[in-house]
């Protein structure tokens, strides 16, 4: 299972590089850990996801506006937000391998392995008993399953308590008591567990001393909080209202593996929704459901999403869930929905000395609004789309084996909407194809290509998810029609040239995509 997951992720990484989606940063210098660059197709995919998110949050909701705040912020922001004191991960080093790990992740990985063992036992039982298999009874009585379950419960209870109490010694004890070894070398020679702050620091201006220390923002949310008054006043908004933004965030992650899932420089799409205190659970449920619908609307498969309740709430939250996606590495967080209470605005009031309140005419009083936040990782969304839409299809014909790799992603998000080919590079076909390209390129991201056989050109477009390939052939010269090949069905139909813009629009329409959500 783990091997299969590993193989799938490796395939996605290789494909993303080969087809210009994602490259390792500074690759000619052997790369930079957990930093990636987006190539010619990756940036288009990313821009389309941003458009889908921005329009669905800002355009479809009358009471949400967008901003774009700076990455650098006053250092007091991070003192007020709690990030200077509490934005830590528990880290542990292996003394033999010198490798560094997150203690919480080592323990969580062990729990996943035990869950897999239980699953294996159940599958064995299912095979052995066939139609007579009673899963509930088997789980309740099988000695192996019972042993695994008891171990899992022991670890889980100790782990949850240790995380809640911030008890680093207990995290160390769990690792030692349950014999957790370095996943790469098997060594169990561990240091104690220490806290590690994830914020990057740098110096502002020409004098390097403590007073000039600034941080690269670890989340975009604080840029929204410090602009709460500015936006409320200038947009004449009343509660409830939201502020959205898309931007880069930076975290010095201890263990940065799994491709763009955990990066040191990444992009977030966040929205803070300001509300009357006491209404937060209602709004929390509302945004949880809306955001889950947003994900499912992409058509990657409803079964690929699940909701995970937090065992340990962040320092600012009174309710929180993750929307998890079934990545090649298993179910993992793609978005967080957090009820942040009045924590952030109250802290900024305290540290700035400015009132950050709303006068509620209905209640006849001022108060610090509560906040429900939605926070999704853009890079994780890219990975979700790439991994869910990557398919290897057997298209063998007449004894010739052939596999096609196709990215069957939602057409509205595809980097290139249509590719235009002349069948051959002569007899005036390229001129007609170029004219079609010119007609379409002001409306869509289209591509002209004339190199290689038509079959190879189709395969290249399938591999980057282009919904339509348009071929100009000799019949075009007679009747002004072209063939249009559909990426998913591979069916080809003849279409008059003048109908192409409408046909492509219908296929890739972001408006239609948004309409499905706007009910
Ligand atoms: N403002 C709240 C906040 O930042 P978070 O759960 O820490 O909450 C939100 O992050 C989302 O940002 C995550 O669900 C994930 O998709 C993305 N994210 C967080 N750390 C990341 C990293 N190191 N690399 C890529 N994406 C990350």
Image: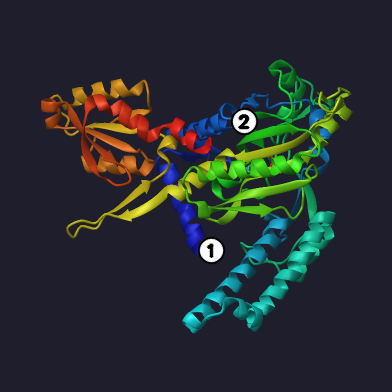
- Indicate how the structure is coloured in the image: rainbow
**Taking 504 as reference, is 415 left or right?**
right
**Taking 180 as reference, is 505 left or right?**
left
Farthest-out residue, top: 234
What element does badge 1 sit on?
A: helix
What element does badge 2 sit on?
A: strand
Q: Which labelled disc corresponds to residue 335?
A: none
> Which residue is located at x 24 percent, y 58 percent?
401
> Which residue is located at x 36 percent, y 44 percent?
463
The spot of residue 91 in percent (x, y) is: 74, 53
> Which residue is located at x 77 percent, y 21 percent?
229
Q: Vertically, is 9 above or below 185?
A: above
Between marks 1 and 2, how big is the CA–CA gap? 33 Å
Whether label 1 touches label 2, CB < 8 Å:
no
**Taking 397 as reference, is 412 left or right?**
right
Is residue 34 visible in the rendered image? The answer is no
Farthest-out residue, front: 362
Is residue 72 visible in the rendered image? The answer is yes
Q: Vertically, is 170 above or below 218?
A: below
Q: Classify the position of ligand 1 by quadrant: top left, top right, bottom left or bottom right.
A: top right
**Taking 344 as reference, is 117 left or right?**
left
Nearest-to-viewer mark from 1 and 2: 2
Q: Name the residue under label 1.
A: 2
> Which residue is located at x 67 percent, y 55 percent?
99
Q: Name the residue under label 2.
A: 247
The spot of residue 151 in percent (x, y) is: 72, 73
Foreground pick, 501 / 253: 501
């Amino acid at each position: 299972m783990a091997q299969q997951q590993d193989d799938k992720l490796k395939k996605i990484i290789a494909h993303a590089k080969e087809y210009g989606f994602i490259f390792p940063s500074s690759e000619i210098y052997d790369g930079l850990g957990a930093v990636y660059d987006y190539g010619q197709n990756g940036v288009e995919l990313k821009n389309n996801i941003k458009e889908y998110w921005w329009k669905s949050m800002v355009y479809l909701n009358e009471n949400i506006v967008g901003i774009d705040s700076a990455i650098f912020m006053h250092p007091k922001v991070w003192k007020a937000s709690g990030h200077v004191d509490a934005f830590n991960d528990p880290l542990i080093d292996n003394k033999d391998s010198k490798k560094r790990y997150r203690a919480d992740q080592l323990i969580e990985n062990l729990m996943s392995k035990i869950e897999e063992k239980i699953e294996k036992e159940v599958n064995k039982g299912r095979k052995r008993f066939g139609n007579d298999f009673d899963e509930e009874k088997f789980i309740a009585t099988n000695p192996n399953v019972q042993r695994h379950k008891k171990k899992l419960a022991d670890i889980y209870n100790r782990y949850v308590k240790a995380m809640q109490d911030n008890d680093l010694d207990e995290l160390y004890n769990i690792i030692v008591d349950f014999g957790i070894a370095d996943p790469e070398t098997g060594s169990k020679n561990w240091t104690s567990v220490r806290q590690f702050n994830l914020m990057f620091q740098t110096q502002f201006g020409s004098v390097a001393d403590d007073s000039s220390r600034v941080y690269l923002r670890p989340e975009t949310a604080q840029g929204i909080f410090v602009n709460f008054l500015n936006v409320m006043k200038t947009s004449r908004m009343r509660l409830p209202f939201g502020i959205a933004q898309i931007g880069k965030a930076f975290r010095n992650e201890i263990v940065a593996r799994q491709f763009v899932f955990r990066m040191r420089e990444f992009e977030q799409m966040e929205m803070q929704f300001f509300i009357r205190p006491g209404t937060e659970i209602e709004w929390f449920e509302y945004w949880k459901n809306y955001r889950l619908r947003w994900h499912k609307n992409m058509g990657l498969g409803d079964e690929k999403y699940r909701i995970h309740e937090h065992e340990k709430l962040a320092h600012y939250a009174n309710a929180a869930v993750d929307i998890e996606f079934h990545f090649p590495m298993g179910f993992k967080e793609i978005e967080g929905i957090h009820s942040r209470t009045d924590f952030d605005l109250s802290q900024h009031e305290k540290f700035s000395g400015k009132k950050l309140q709303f006068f509620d005419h209905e209640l006849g009083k001022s108060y610090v609004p509560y906040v429900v936040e939605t926070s999704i990782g853009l890079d994780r969304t890219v990975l979700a789309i790439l991994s869910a839409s990557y398919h290897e299809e057997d298209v063998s014909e007449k004894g010739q084996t052939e596999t096609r790799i196709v990215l069957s992603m939602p057409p509205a998000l595809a980097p290139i909407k249509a590719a235009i080919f002349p069948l051959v590079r002569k007899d005036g076909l390229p001129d007609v194809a170029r004219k079609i390209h010119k007609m379409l390129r002001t409306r869509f991201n289209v591509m002209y290509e004339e190199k290689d056989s038509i079959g190879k050109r189709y395969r290249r477009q399938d591999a980057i998810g282009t919904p339509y390939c348009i071929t100009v052939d000799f019949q075009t010269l007679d009747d002004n029609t072209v063939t249009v090949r559909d990426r998913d069905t591979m069916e080809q139909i003849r279409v008059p040239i003048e109908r192409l813009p409408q046909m492509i629009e219908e296929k890739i329409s972001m408006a239609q995509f948004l309409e499905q959500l706007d009910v």
